Amino acid sequence: MRLPHVSLLALLALAVAPTAQAAKHCLPYAPLRISLSGTLERAAASASRAGQPPTEADPLAAHTLRLPAPVCVAVSADGQSAAHDNVRVLALGLTPAQAAHLDEDLGQTVRLHGRLSQGAHVGAGGERTVRLTVEEIEGD
């Protein structure tokens, strides 16, 4: 039995659609390690917990990494962390020593290596942020 031409095209479109979406490469959550470059910035007060200023015990609230182009983050393998599209700013998880070191690089382009997780902070749109726990600062 021969399928009509239109139905064959529709089937082909359905078969190609998931492939096109799968081709979109998104960053993974931990445990995979990633490397990103961007401009180091001080976090806005609204990005810290409930509008409170960052504290010594919470240095991750003090710095963000602004990416030169938006990225996407895939849903975590366990489904506990949501996918994100058009991520332009990452909250940084830093040790106090890393935070003090990076204070010298505010406004500069830096390359950081670490692992992504769902951030504890809520952005302006009510969406949870993505956090990069920094394991290495390139050039150190």
Image (cartoon, rainbow, N blue to C red):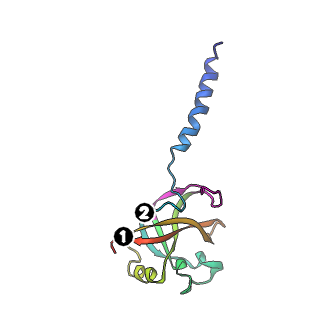
Asked whether the residues under the numbered discs 2 and 1 touch, taking CB atoms below 8 Å apart as contact, a structural biologist would say yes
Q: Quadrant of the N terminus?
A: top right
Residue 54, position as x, y percentages in the image: 56, 83
Residue matched to label 2:
35
Identified at 49% across, 77% down, the residue is 94
Closer to the camera in the image, 11 or 106: 11
Residue matched to label 1:
138
Residue 102, position as x, y percentages in the image: 41, 79
Identified at 63% across, 59% down, the residue is 82
Q: Residue furthest top?
A: 1
Residue 8: quadrant of the picture: top right
Q: Is residue 129 magenta?
A: no
Q: Is residue 79 magenta?
A: yes
Residue type for callout 2: Ser
Q: Is residue 118 above or below residue 52?
A: above
Residue 128, position as x, y percentages in the image: 63, 67
Residue type for callout 1: Glu
Magenta-tinted stretch: 67-84
Q: Residue furthest bottom?
A: 56
Closer to the camera in the image, 31 or 107: 31
Residue 83, position as x, y percentages in the image: 60, 56
Q: Residues within 10 Å of mark 2 (few under 14, many from 20)?
A: some
Disc 2 versus disc 1: distance between alpha carbons? 9 Å
Residue 47: quadrant of the picture: bottom right
- Secondary structure, mark 1, is loop
